[in-house]
Image (cartoon, grey):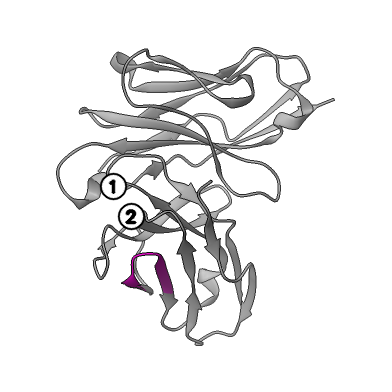
Amino acid sequence: DVKVTQSSRYLVKRTGEKVFLECVQDMDHENMFWYRQDPGLGLRLIYFSYDVKMKEKGDIPEGYSVSREKKERFSLILESASTNQTSMYLCASSFGGGNTIYFGEGSWLTVV
Amino acid sequence: AQSVSQHNHHVILSEAASLELGCNYSYGGTVNLFWYVQYPGQHLQLLLKYFSGDPLVKGIKGFEAEFIKSKFSFNLRKPSVQWSDTAEYFCAVNALYSGAGSYQLTFGKGTKLSVIP
């Protein structure tokens, strides 16, 4: 079974803090993704990466950055957290183009 | 860029009722299509997918979906729902074109299904 592990399930951070969300996958997938999930808005893509050190902006990249130094690990960084970034963040991975994406359990981030 | 529309935000059914959730997408080229399900407190799981071939695809737990290319639709169906089907359902589309963007899935906003015992 594919396993996508997000290091933190629940976080509470203060406005202005720098926040790191970590994700690791164990299936040697080339592609990794960060989505955020909000009620009534579905899943929106923040960034994705199709290779080590490569990154592409998704639909809502503003206020976020990412890092992929190793194939199995994809980090999402909130440079200066704001209250409108309170959300559920989902990491995912896939093999090749157009294939099934596998999701982690999600990280609930609350910014106060 | 492609977009995905799910017609119903919240559907409430009694057990044993039939289910159909609508999904339409906007992209004229080749697509891969997915339905994901998120049970309360759990992560997103693949319910079924369509890549090519028979447009009627069967997934887990008795779900099926039909791809109608002329209507840009991929509706999800189940003949008889159970209380355990209570979840949120997401339709997703991958538009196959050259470039890095072809790796991503675009999701609909989701449909919450509540099944009353």
* Lateral position of residue A89 relative to residue B97, left or right: right
User: Percent position (x, y) of residue B56?
Assistant: 43, 13
* In the foreground, A43 or A10: A10
Q: Residue at x 59, y 56 (%)?
A: A105
- Residue A26, above or below B30: below
Of the residues shown, which amino acid type is indicated by label 2?
Asn
Q: CA distance from mark 2 to mark 1?
A: 8 Å
- Quarter of the image with the C terminus of chain B is top right
Q: Secondary structure at mark 2?
A: strand
Start-end of magenta stretch: A66-76
- Residue A32, above or below B17: below
User: Percent position (x, y) of residue B95?
Assistant: 26, 37
Q: Chain of mark 1?
A: B
Of the residues shown, which amino acid type is indicated by label 1?
Tyr
Label 2, on which residue? A31
Q: Residue at x 43, y 53 (%)?
A: A27
Residue B46 appearing in the image: yes
Label 1, on which residue? B103
* In the foreground, B58 or A25: A25
Q: Secondary structure at mark 1?
A: helix
| Occupied quadrant, residue A88 | bottom right
Please determine if labels 2 and 1 lie on a single subunit. Answer: no
Q: Chain of mark 2?
A: A
Q: Residue at x 42, y 33 (%)?
A: B5
User: Percent position (x, y) of residue A30?
Assistant: 31, 55
